[in-house]
Amino acid sequence: MNQNHRVLIWVGAGVIVLMLVTAAFALGVYVGEHGWTREGLTLGGPGEPDRQPGPPGGAGMPPGQPLPGGQPTLVGRIRLRLDEGLELATPQGPRPVSLTSTTRFEDAQGNPIEPDALRRGDIVAIFGHFEEGGQRTLVADLVVRFPDGR
């Protein structure tokens, strides 16, 4: 094997290593933004554009909407309505929310609404607390539904 072949092999190996490092970096950025699961990737329903409500505290919330009681514990789009609560799609992935008989429901203006008014795809802010006993289920004290412009 002559000197030119060795140089070409080293250049090819360097290009392959550079491609692998770039791919690993891109995967890390993607997972950091979207999470590992498909459910965490989109907050829009079928045929809807993705809407990322953003971190709790109002970033990404509809403009001009006051938040009652400070920052919400969780913000997301309703994925599923369950017998005992809701499952929200959030940038961190799906999150369960328990609804109790004392949970209050309001629209963005603070007017009471019926629990049945909540639909799959609605953006909601949850004000609540986590269950005792180490479970990570959020128990909602107040659910605020925001208009989504549909």
Image (spheres, rainbow, N blue to C red):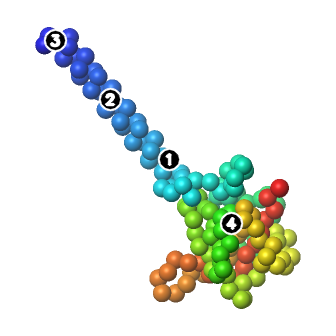
Q: Which residue is mark 3?
A: 3
Q: Are marks 4 and 2 in contact (CB under 8 Å)?
A: no
Point out the tag, 3 or 2, that comes first from the N-terminus.
3
Can residue 85 be seen here? The reply is yes
The x, y position of residue 57, in whole percent, is: 67, 66
Q: Nearer the viewer, mark 4 or mark 2?
A: 4
Q: Are marks 2 and 1 in contact (CB under 8 Å)?
A: no
Disc 3 and disc 4: Cα gap in Å? 64 Å
Q: Which residue is mark 4?
A: 78
- CA neighbours of label 4 inside 10 A, class few (<14), some (14 to 19), many (20+): many
- CA neighbours of label 2 inside 10 A, class few (<14), some (14 to 19), many (20+): few
Q: Are marks 4 and 1 in contact (CB under 8 Å)?
A: no
Tell me: 116 left or right of 137. right
Query: What is the three-letter code of the residue carrying label 3?
Result: Gln
- CA neighbours of label 1 inside 10 A, class few (<14), some (14 to 19), many (20+): few
Q: Are marks 3 and 4 in contact (CB under 8 Å)?
A: no
Compared to residue 92, the image places residue 69 above or below, namely below
Residue found at x 14% / y 10%? 2
Query: What is the three-letter code of the residue carrying label 2?
Result: Ile
Q: Secondary structure at mark 2?
A: helix
The furthest residue to the bottom: 101
Q: Which residue is mark 2?
A: 16
Point out the tag, 3 or 4, that comes first from the N-terminus.
3
The x, y position of residue 39, in whole percent, is: 57, 58
Point out the tag, 4 or 2, that comes first from the N-terminus.
2
Point out the tag, 4 or 1, that comes first from the N-terminus.
1
Disc 3 and disc 2: Cα gap in Å? 20 Å
Q: Which residue is mark 1?
A: 30
Disc 1 and disc 3: Cα gap in Å? 41 Å
